[in-house]
């Protein structure tokens, strides 16, 4: 079986708060992925870039709270999953994850989502926008998109965030406790949602919400490496190129595409 990992860009940032600019994230990651300073290999020596199938960018209207944009994302995810090949989606802000998970949950029962982020993104209705990038996991849990949600790197949980974690049975692990994450205990299909602000800003300055005290890049790679070979999809979100420094964060995003894609190929083989 020849596995091709679909890479789909979703240039949507209308559901952002504080700053906009994430709509430029997919193209910035692509630019880094194909820049002259990189090569095609993962750290394990897998020539992964030729195994990527670039699906381009989804033609979203980029309107805050848009159900039409959400439906486009869900439909595009369905189409790729129907091919039998896995998918990495490049954001865009984190609001794209909820419509992705709607399609993923249709195909995979007993789904576990591993979510790396500085923020839990479980507000009930942030800024009077239920589709805000601060709310995707509240919507996904309400819709029954997953059996369990494990959040790593969280360091900004408000009282509402903690209440929502208790309400939905979310396992929330702070950066200083990340050693508690037991990837070997995970069972069934896995989906990875990776917000670049889960990393420390010294590693990933090109995000809209700097939150010091985050995960190191090596810690994130170790998390990906430790996942069992049942990963079926992933998203990498919240790159804001207008905040980046010398394309540092775009290069981080590009390397994450390679390492995550290699795990997806391993899981599909």
Image (cartoon, helix red, strand yellow):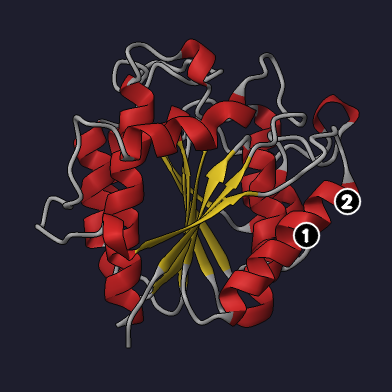
- Give the x, y percent position of residue 75: 74, 66
Which residue, given by chain and number where applicable, does mark 2 sit on?
A: 68
Q: Is 14 or 191 nearer to us in this picture?
A: 14
Which quadrant holds residue 264? bottom left
Q: Is 230 or 159 nearer to us in this picture?
A: 230
Which mark, by number, is residue 205? none
Q: Is residue 151 above or below residue 83?
A: above
Q: Are marks 1 and 2 in contact (CB under 8 Å)?
A: no
Asked if residue 108 shows in the view, the reply is no
Q: Residue furthest left?
A: 45
Quarter of the picture holding the N terminus: bottom left
SS at circle 1:
helix
Q: Is residue 106 above or below residue 149?
A: below
Q: Residue furthest front?
A: 36
Which residue, given by chain and number where applicable, does mark 1 sit on?
A: 142
- Give the x, y percent position of residue 154: 47, 34
Say which residue appears at 37% left-offset and 37% top-offset: 253
Q: Is residue 236 above or below residue 202?
A: below
Say which residue appears at 57% left-offset and 50% top-offset: 56
């Amino acid at each position: 079986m020849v596995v091709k990992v679909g890479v789909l860009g979703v240039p949507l940032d209308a559901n952002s708060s504080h700053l906009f600019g994430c709509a430029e994230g997919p193209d910035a990651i692509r630019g880094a992925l194909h820049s002259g300073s990189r090569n095609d290999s993962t750290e394990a020596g897998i020539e992964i870039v030729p195994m990527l199938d670039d699906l381009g960018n989804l033609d979203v209207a980029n309107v805050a709270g848009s159900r039409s944009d959400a439906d486009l994302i869900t439909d595009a995810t369905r189409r790729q999953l129907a091919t039998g090949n896995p998918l990495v989606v490049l954001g865009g802000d984190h609001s794209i994850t909820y419509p992705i998970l709607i399609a993923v949950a249709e195909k995979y029962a007993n789904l576990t989502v591993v979510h790396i982020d500085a923020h839990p993104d479980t507000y009930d209705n942030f800024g009077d926008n239920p589709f805000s990038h601060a709310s995707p996991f509240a919507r996904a849990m309400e819709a029954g998109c997953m059996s369990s949600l494990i959040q790593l790197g969280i360091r900004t949980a408000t009282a509402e965030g903690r209440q929502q974690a208790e309400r939905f049975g979310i396992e929330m692990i702070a950066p200083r406790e990340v050693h508690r994450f037991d990837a070997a205990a995970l069972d069934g299909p896995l989906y990875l949602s990776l917000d670049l602000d889960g990393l420390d800003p010294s590693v990933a300055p090109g995000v809209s919400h700097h939150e010091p005290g985050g995960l190191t890049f090596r810690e994130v790679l170790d998390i990906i490496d430790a996942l069992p070979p049942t990963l079926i999809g992933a998203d990498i979100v919240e790159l804001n190129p207008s905040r980046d420094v010398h394309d540092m964060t775009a290069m981080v995003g590009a390397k994450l595409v390679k390492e995550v894609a290699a795990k997806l190929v391993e899981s599909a083989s």
